[in-house]
Each structure stands twice: as C-alpha cells, then as structure tokens.
Amino acid sequence: MILGAQLRRLREAASLSRADAGFTIRASESKMSRLESGKVTFKERDIADLLTTYGINDPTERDAFLGLVKLSNQQGWWHRYNDVIPGWFNDFVGLEESASLIQSYEHQFVPGLLQTEDYARAVMTHGRPQYATDDIEQRIDVRRRRQRILARPGAPHLWVVLDESVLHRPVGGRRVLDAQINAMLEASSLPHITVQIVTYDRNSNAAEGAFTLLRFAEKELPTLVYIEHLTGALYLDRLDEVETYGRVLDSLAVDAETPENSRQILAKLRAEL
C-alpha cells in the first residue's frame, strides 16, 4: 500500500493519467487503480518501467523503490495458515501487524487480541471445547501469534470499548470467564492498552455492531475500518466513512466509563466470580 501510494504521487507529479501510465506496462486503467491502492502484487519489471516513465532515473532512488517491491511480495507468517483462515481475514492480520493504533468496539465477545486460549476455544466451538478440531486449534494458534504484536518493541496502542454484557456472558463457563476477566485486568494495566466499558446504565446506541479502526504511522496509508460478518468482511477507507466511524467511536468512549473506572469494574467482577 505504501509503494502504491508513492507510485500514484509520482504519476500525478508527471501529469499522467492512469490510462497513460498503464499503457507503459500493458495494464488497464482499472489494474493501475488496484496497483496504486496496493490490492495487487507488483512485478519488478513493471515498476522499473513505470519509474522510467515518471522520470526517476537516479540509481539510488530506483533501488529504494525496487527494494520495496521485494518487501511487498514477501509473505507474512500468517500465510502458512491459509488452509484454516479465510482470505478476507488473512488481509486483516497483515494490516493489524502494520497498525500503530488499533481501536475496537465489541458488544458480544472479548476482542481477539485480548482473548485467553480457553476463551477463544469456547468462542470457536460455540461453547463445546471438547469438540475442537485440528483446524480450530490452528486458528487458536493464529490468535496467539496475533497477540504477540502487543508484546513487541514499538507495540501498537490497543484501545477497546467493550459493552458490559460481554463481561456477563458465560463463554466457556465460570472458570473460563474468570480467567478472561483477570487477563483483561492485567492487560489494561499496560500503558499501551486501554479498556473502557460501556455499562448498562450508560448504554449507547451510537454503534449498530462491532468494528475496528486501524490507524498507521505511515502517512501514505489511509485509516481503515474493518467490519466482520458471518461470511466475510468489509474494509472501508473512504474519508467520509472513516470519519463517521471515528465519530461513533468517540461517542462510545464518552459514554463509557473511564479506563480507571473500567479497571475497577473488572476487579469487582473478578472478586464476585
């Protein structure tokens, strides 16, 4: 996506249309659009031809662009799980790895990045962990691998707004829920993880369902909204759509308890379980 955005700027600086640039590499205007939005893989020869067309002849500058081509075509660790996770979620894992700020609203389950192994297994088996298949165990492994981003140097900031009903839904039973609440309490003590709870008496109707905003440190990357449904997911990047979801999340954060009060709620629930 970064490389595509840079190529778009070079094309615009050269006052060329997508159709004109596409003619250089025998590509349609629609393919050029997908290339510039990072939705197709890059061929080194095509990028080299485009750089020439855009007047980029300095060897050092060209090498930097071609180096990005090689990086963009490398597969991440999550690709080895292609047989158990769908392609639309595969894309999300890659974007999540690159995000500097992950903001989520959840009203049914604890977000995947904060789920314990037993809680995740209960969710994936619809409350019947004894029937977990090999595929489900691999999906749990993916979830564990995803969670490592929160422990790495330069970890992204995770900000979760959680409906209180999630904390009372006995996913996996009392023991599993108790361990899950304890794990969230520990996680929320870290400076880069924020948890806010929308309590019953402050329930907000600002959101119709769960969603995640992914924000990136690189200015070339747009903020994305991720909305998952039963058979796939939506990725929204239009400015008006992103701003709408951003305002909704701000409203939810205002309605929710403060991070400190939310931690007190978690601690009280842990003591009661």
Image (cartoon, rainbow, N blue to C red):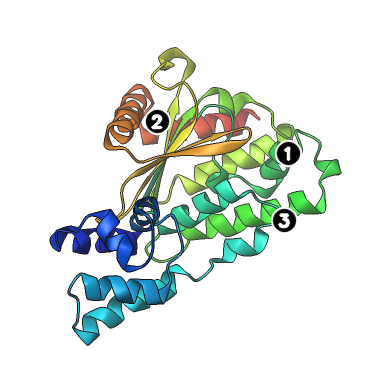
The residue at the point 51 percent across, 52 percent down is 91
| Label 1 or label 3, whichever comes before in sequence order | 1
Q: Secondary structure at mark 1?
A: helix
In this rendering, the label closer to the viewer, 3 or 2: 3
**Label 1 neighbour load within 10 Å: few <14, some 14-19, many 20+:** many
**Closer to the camera, 179 or 49?**
49
Q: Amino acid at mark 1?
A: Ala
Q: Amino acid at mark 3?
A: Gln
**Residue 261 marker:** 2
The residue at the point 19 percent across, 81 percent down is 57
Estimate the x, y position of residue 69 in percent, counting from the top left. 39, 72
Residue indicated by mark 1 = 122
Estimate the x, y position of residue 111 in percent, counting from the top left. 54, 40
Q: Amino acid at mark 2?
A: Asn
Q: Quote the CA–CA distance across marks 1 and 3.
A: 14 Å
Judge left or right: residue 168 versus residue 52: right
**Residue 138 marker:** 3
**Closer to the camera, 152 or 26?**
26
Q: Quote the CA–CA distance across marks 2 and 1.
A: 28 Å
* Placement of 175 over or under 117, stated as above or below: above
> Looking at the image, do the residues carrying marks 2 and 1 touch, with CB atoms under 8 Å apart?
no
**Label 2 neighbour load within 10 Å: few <14, some 14-19, many 20+:** some
Q: Quote the CA–CA distance across marks 3 and 2.
A: 36 Å
